[in-house]
Image (cartoon, rainbow, N blue to C red):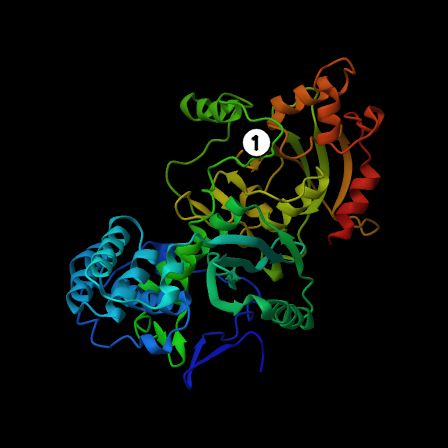
Amino acid sequence: MSPVSRNRRRNGKKRSVRSGTPLALLGAPEECDCPHCTGEQGVPSDIGDLLAQSVDLDAMQEPLDVELASAMLLAIGAAMSDDIESVVRELFVPTFEAKATPEARAMLAGLGALADGDAGRAATEAAGRLADSGVTAASWLAELAEPVAVEEPRRFADPSGFTFLLAARFARAGRSHVIAVAMDDCDCGAAGHLLIIEAARWPEAREALLSELRAGGVDVREKALRPADFRRSVETALDARASHDRTDPEAVNALVEDEGPGDAALALLLRAWVRALPLPTQRRRGRLHDAELDVASISKLLDMLVPPGRGGALPMPRRRIDVPPKRKKSDGAAPIHQIKVSLRGARPPIWRRLEVPADITLARLHTLIQVAFDWHDSHLHVFETPYGSFGTPDPQLGHRAASRITLEQVAPAAGDKLRYTYDFGDNWEHDILVERVLDRDASATYPRCVGGRRAAPPEDCGGVWGYAELVEIVGDPAHPEHRERLDWLDLGDPADFDPARFDAKAVTAALQQRR
């Protein structure tokens, strides 16, 4: 039996979690006319008797069982009402509390663990009242109150940045499971299928999933994610999926699979578990510089408030402007864009001149910039263009999928400009200028670096101001923080730190390794 299909047998009854075919995500992106992208969303408002089925507490042997049962109930309620908090407080909680049985207490505890805000508190308080009144509970139910630890968050992606899978291990009270989210960057970055796998079986399942992708010719690479970035990526993917499912006439029927909970229920469980992670807006410990005021953000705010002059901020539209269509095969091969990518605010200037095919996606351009500046793709990014913002899809931030847009769609001519921001904490802002549009050189291999200046700053050093401070301190052996900064850079000799270093040939070699 494949380790991807998690079959759990309880008292002779088979209970499993949907596995499906989560990795069938290959193929060229297509234009999306889904309600999530067009804004034509609707939510059913009818709600019926959702509590007709009894809870089989005897079939449950761990907190995950009652969480999944509660998640299925919440998923059904959310599909039938746009006010799930009221449904929990006014229907689920009083109905279960009135039953006053061990099963009802378990379900209230499960709802309290999964539901957010006032709804979760109401369920937890009701479970407490049943406990005070003498209603018994399974011995393992107390584990629901234990904190969930999220460990080893990972992203599985190809070299161009196309994400296929997000996965992390969730541990609580000595039990642990891995939840994996199959991603579809071609579908607004929405989550595909969700898998829940016993931690002991994850290595085998991981190899099975990667083998399936590699058998299709995909170069999959595994990378650790910061906890906050993992939370943002998961929540963004789940939000996009929820918006699609909300108007799917089959969504309600698919909430519960023949052998267990469907993806909607697993999504609710995953949302509850990732709430243990820091919010994406929080700065993580371990950065070299953590000023009270983010000067880069203040500068960005001023750009928005003050009308830009020549050489200033990009002229951003107040409403979304349709992106020009992509190049057709009949149009012939795309030309070459010579672009200058400059790190904004760096003194002395730090920049790279790259030659890239004009029809590369912005997701691919992101990867090339990461290589050219020796960044490590450990943080979020966004491209600001005259047609809107593109990066990891995020409906709340207004970011659309960078994998769906090409460079020449948003910057077709010499003189066109883009803004690229990497790491929303340190705010490494880059100005991208299309310097020239060139015919392809048959003797050349693209992409390539044909110019530049100075080494890029190390990640997490506090932005351009933190980097300037770092250069000053490392260059001054008498500075009291000199040795501390060298240790942070993992250098034994200050001579090994050379901010003026730049080698276009080495950058080109690195770029072409990522072709």
Q: Is residue 440 left or right of residue 330?
A: right
Q: Which residue lies most toward the bottom here?
A: 12
- The answer, for residue 33, to whether it is visible in the render is no
Q: Secondary structure at mark 1?
A: loop
Residue 61 lies in what quarter of the image? bottom left
**Within 10 Å of the Cα at label 1, are there few (<14), some (14-19), or many (20+) other Cα atoms?**
many
User: Does residue 355 lie above or below 491 as drawn?
Assistant: below
Assign the C terminus to one quadrant of the image: bottom right
- The answer, for residue 271, to whether it is visible in the render is yes
Q: Which residue lies at the image location 59% right of the left edge and 54% below the top edge? A: 152
Counting from the top left corner in percent of width and height, residue 415 is at 60, 33
From the image, tell me which residue sits under label 1: 426
Counting from the top left corner in percent of width and height, residue 169 is at 54, 59
Counting from the top left corner in percent of width and height, residue 314 is at 50, 31
Q: Which residue lies most toward the front here?
A: 134
| Picture mark count | 1
User: Does residue 103 lie above or below 358 as drawn?
Assistant: below
Question: In this orientation, which residue lies closer to the viewer: 202 or 40?
Answer: 202
Counting from the top left corner in percent of width and height, residue 174 is at 51, 60
Assign the N terminus to one quadrant of the image: bottom right
Q: Is residue 445 left or right of residue 398?
A: right
Question: In this orientation, which residue lies closer to the viewer: 266 or 346?
Answer: 266
Q: Which residue lies most toward the top here?
A: 478
Q: Amino acid at mark 1?
A: Asp
